[in-house]
Image (cartoon, rainbow, N blue to C red):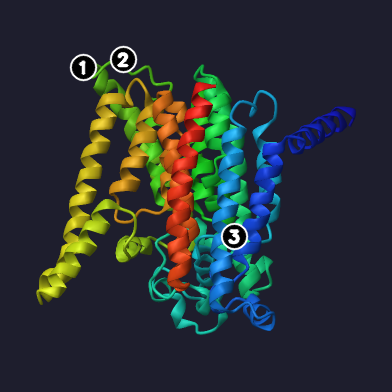
Amino acid sequence: MSGFAGWVRARWQDFVRAIRLAPVRLGLLGTVLLVVGSLSPAYLPQASPYWPVMRALGLDTAWARVMATVLVIGAVGLLIIAWYRLRPAVYHDVKPWAILCWWAIPLIAAPPIFSHDAYSYAAQGWLIENGLNPYEVSPSVLPGTFADQVAWLWRYTPAPYGPLALTLAHWLDQLAGFNPYYSAVAQRIPALIGVALIVHYLPRIARQIGIDPHQTAWFSAINPLLVIDLIGGAHNDALMMGMVALAISWAYKGWHWPAVVALGVGMAVKQPAVLAAFPVAVIGSSWASWRWRDLVRFLPRALTTLGGVLAVFAGISWATGLGFGWLNAVSVPGMIVTLAPFSLIGWVCQQVFLALGMTTAAASVIPLLQSISLGIAAVLMVWLAIRFGRTEPLRFLAWAYLAFAVFGPALHTWYLLWGALFLPLAKVSERVLRTAAAVTSVLLVYGAGNLAWRNSEIAIALAGVAAGGAWIILRRRAQAVASA
């Protein structure tokens, strides 16, 4: 018992030591302001229980929405500045988990931030409770608050997520007593578990492969994009990536089959986890070269690894009773215009064709470009596998995930975390890491304004000005940190 008490005392000291640092307090202020700013009509769905309160307080006005947008952008700026200032201290002077805990506290009970996906998860769990398969029907078939909270497009589409993610959503709805709002907030629980796995295992993987865990602890474990999108947004990507991190760490320990099982579980949460099957097969394989003889020796291990991951995924699909209906929804994420380059190009082309009266071409151009984009992603991933897969499996994983995110049918800011979390483990240059940090900053400011399109033009203009100012300031800070 004394050993456990000593462990608890040490963790408490780490926790207290973290809040004594000014940048940690600055980031905490940022997440507090983020929650306050998000408790507004600018960011809440129409069915939110906060709307009556907003109206009673007279906050359902254009200027209230503007102020909420400005407050959220300012909060994001504080969090980014705190992140940069902590770079010299994290891991060496203060533990990353302690920093993350302080920053996450205000977000734990807050409504989903920067995304309404958690409301979709809750609505899909509600479908299961009523004996319906979310792969076959959309939330709209059960009118009510669960459906009303879901973003208008996803209200009428089936679920694209893994069967375990849907089953967890159902269990969390049960935990919340089927209260629509609390069911959505409860979706943050698996996200927190996933983030805990990420923060625990990524620095340990750095030590396992013989590199300084400091960069990983700073860039990956306390990245503001992770804080806001994975914790604040409650995305199931967090649990998927947590299981991938667990699998990679176990693979380096020589626990090959437990790693395979972990990947299968991750895939049952969200399907892109399967991409990590290749590095898990490579790690510990003693794959010597691309010569035919060595390749033939490695091939059985690769096939059994992939087969094991798919078998676990299939077993969970069978156990949940949901089956493989997600195959019918693979095109759902690409139904809206996102940051994906070919999505933007397709939208522009579509508008041109519509203006010219070419409706047939307008209807087909986006699916065509999405197919081309996926082909580019496939070619890039094959090239990365050949170039880095055998000798640097984590470099392959980082860049392959980024290639799939960028050239997939849809690109959201949290998709970039799939690969970005592994960038420090890919032994990239300092210049690449600085660029990634700058991109992170810009994406966060974009996310702050993305849900504010329902606001007035003034709010959008302010968001644009803030984004430009944040880019200039943060580039200067990045250069100052690099030269320090």
Specify whether 332 is left or right of 50. Answer: left
Residue 390 place in picture, x, y as percent: 32, 23
Q: Residues within 10 Å of mark 3 (few under 14, many from 20)?
A: many
Specify whether 10 is left or right of 96. Answer: right
Specify whether 4 is left or right of 315. Answer: right
Place residue 87 in its image quadrant: top right
What residue would you read off at disc 1? Answer: 291
Residue 312 place in picture, x, y as percent: 45, 46
- In the rendered view of the protein, which quadrant contains the N terminus? top right
Three-letter code, disc 3: Leu
* In the image, residue 143 above or below residue 214: below
Give the alpha-carbon distance from disc 1 to disc 3, as whole Å.
58 Å
Residue 86 place in picture, x, y as percent: 62, 33
What residue would you read off at disc 2? Answer: 288
What residue would you read off at disc 3? Answer: 71
Q: Residue at x 43, y 70 (%)?
A: 457
Q: Residues within 10 Å of mark 1 (few under 14, many from 20)?
A: few
